[in-house]
Amino acid sequence: MTRRQRRLTMIGGSLAVLALAAALVLNALRDSIVFFSTPSMAAEKQIPAGKRFRLGGLVENGSLKRGDNLAVSFKVSDGGATLPVTYKGILPDLFREGQGVVAEGALDSSGVFKADTVLAKHDETYMPKDVADALKKQGHWKDDYDRKPGVAGSPQASQGAAK
Amino acid sequence: MIAEAGHYALVLALALALIQSTVPILGARLRDPALMNVARSTALAQLLFVLVSFASLVALHVASDFSVVNVFENSHSLKPLIYKITGVWGNHEGSMLLWVSILALFGGLVAAFGNNLPLSLRAYVLAVQAWIASAFYLFILITSNPFLRIASPPIEGRDLNPVLQDIGLAVHPPMLYLGYVGFSISFSFAVAALLEGRIDAAWARWVRPWTLVAWIFLTLGIAMGSYWAYYELGWGGWWFWDPVENASLMPWLSGTALLHSAVVMEKRNALRVWTILLAILTFSLSLLGTFLVRSGVLTSVHAFATDPTRGVFILLILCIFIGGSLSLYASRASALKQGGLFAPISREGALVLNNLFLTTACATVFIGTLYPLALEVVTGDKISVGAPFFNLTFAPLFIPLMIAVPFGPLLAWKRGDLVGAAQRLMTAGIAALLAIALLWAWTRGGAALAPLAIGLAVFVIAGALSDLAERTGFFRLPFAIAMRRARGLPRSTWGTAFAHAGVGVALIGIVCETTWNSEYIGSMKPDDVAVIAGYQLKLDGITQKQGPNFREQIAQFTVKHDGETLSVMTPSKRNFTTRQSSTTEAALLTRGFSQLYISLGDITADGAIAVRIYHKPLVLLIWFGPVLMAFGGMLSLSDRRLRVGAPKPAKAARGLQAAE
């Protein structure tokens, strides 16, 4: 093999792997990303039943109801609109009425959001209530990403019985 | 007083770093040994002052001096002593101080133990190290000063986030930072080589131990963090593919690639330009990780905009260092001569393949982590890229890599014999097929992929073992001779085998945990029994207890297996009064490498308690694998060649300089 052939083999191999990776990434981006919505955005966009998304907002005061066998229902609101949510399982430690929540799941045919994952969380400084209220008035809610205790710490994610 | 002393020490460290970042370079340009030696003394003095500063913050936390904002916001007088100390780095300011302390520590180590380096190279390396240090001292002093006072001191602090009040905080962040920041050394060496315009195999010899040290700590740090998340967050997950975790995984992937390409450079003097690039990229990814975690950009792009100084400052540091080093690379790399030819099928070729897959896998993690941020900035759409994305991209890239792993050490340098290597891996291949067949028969109708993945893991482990057997002649020669040969093998060979086997071990744990994990969720009353994976867990009752700064509800479970009482498990829920928040303390029962895991939910009005119980088969292998990898790394680090061999070329180089 000449030097040129060797180099071409290397370059060809690298390109093949990179092309494979690009194909994988594009394919995964098409299928496995989940959009984030607040209740008003969900109403506005008319998200069809069965399409998975992340619902974020504040848990409405007095809306939490516990049913049999760990079934819970609560309402998520962003000031503009409210959406009823059902979930089965154990709610995370930081889940509280009036606090922020992010739930992942899909709407069912009757317009109820069936969550299979509920994340309640905030960063190390704890979101003060008046800030939450201000956000509520504006109709905005920050979508915190999951964090691990190592860095900022907030317990998160509670997996539904589906797993 | 202590706070002011700590602050002052930090300012002095900055001043020293500024001297260290200029004078030695001037010395190297003028070929003045005295000026170049300034680097050594300033690096050591800088370390001393940073340690003074760090010790002051620890002292303030231990003494619960609430007149300091940082202590007030993150401490409480009733907190146990260990958490008062670990709480120092359980917050933004303190953790940045830990970051620069470790940076100074590495600089100090190079200064103290780098006597065998050519004088000018050491001067350049320490100067580059000081650039990074200066930037971060400025960052701390301007935007995140941990020593700020409150005008009217409160009597009591706000306490540390309860989730962080755990022994994990004592171990995980320092380990992780030792890894992250340790890569700054290979970065400084790379930039120094570019500045000097000189690079050779001896350079790789100096860089490799430092990279290895950083890699060992990062490996352990990530594993420790994962185990901590597993038992502390209370839902039994051990990896969430969240951006903070990815931020530590990316430098690990490219650091692993760097470790392997440095071998090629050291042994065969090839892949020089690529190794330099990897050294730059690895530390750039560490910086990116620091940026992602510390700027608040992950919480929300909007949070970034509301408190812009910190984020913008780190972004600036990021741009200057990554942009600067990459432009330097672009302008100087072509001047570095390419050396060492090799055929595609050879040890070098195998290591190139390793690098290719590791860096590509790293790139997919990079895309998955940053794409949501980029999209939100550009279009305002908020998306989340979670586990499905990474399973679809990362996993397929790791499979060919795992298949290739056992081949690497069996191929010869320069020109290898693939068929020969395949023949020597026959036993490993048979073992893998056997494992697949057995598992398939045993789990009929179960998951199809799991036996294949475990077969792959068995192949990697058996491949590592057959490499050892091959080298010692274990099955061919008499036992005594094989043992003698085993003792004679270089430790780095043993290290390679252990590290590679560790990858396989971790894979077995990952596959078993995700495939055969069983779960029970329900509400239980006293004397109820839950049955899971053949274990019977009876809830005996719930008791209350008062801790130092929390109230605790403890549930007691008696665990039986086949009618025989094994143990008592006591998961609990802690309520921290100061922060008005609670944490779940899961109870773990280890049986072999498997674990039973109980975590508690809320207590309902009728006295029932929500419980979540998992049986996780072979879950401990997930962390045992990385420990094996790190152990392999340590063996490799203790190899005589790395310690004794390195000084030789250094002395020659220094002799040359003296003659000039």
Image (spheres, rainbow, N blue to C red):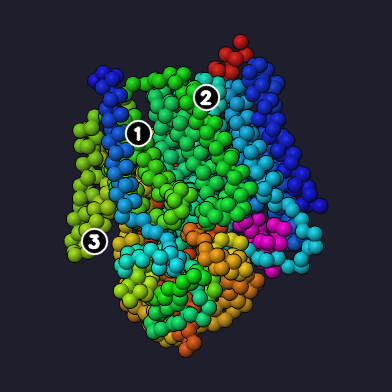
Residue B340 is left or right of residue B443, and the answer is right
Q: Residue at x 61, y 61 (%)?
A: A125
Amino acid type, callout 1: Leu
Say above or below: B510 vs B267: below
Chain name for mark 3: B
Q: Which mark is residue B194?
A: 2
What percent of the width, then of the height, locates residue B497?
Answer: 36, 41
Q: Which mark is residue B447?
A: 3
Residue B501 is left or right of residue B136, and the answer is left
* Quadrant housing residue B454: bottom left
Magenta residues, dominant SS class: helix
Per the model, the C-alpha gap separating discs 2 and 1 is: 23 Å
Residue B193 located within the stretch drawn in magenta: no
Residue range in magenta is: B69-91
Q: Are marks 3 and 1 on the same chain?
A: yes
Amino acid type, callout 3: Ala
Count the marks.
3
Amino acid type, callout 2: Leu
Say above or below: B618 vs B119: below
Q: Residue at x 55, y 65 (%)?
A: A138
- The N terminus of chain A sits in image quarter: top left
Q: Which residue is mark 1?
A: B351
Q: Residues within 10 Å of mark 2 (few under 14, many from 20)?
A: many
Query: Do labels 2 and 3 touch, CB within 8 Å?
Result: no
Per the model, the C-alpha gap separating discs 3 and 1 is: 33 Å
Q: Residue at x 20, y 52 (%)?
A: B434
- First in sequence, mark 3 or 1: give its number: 1
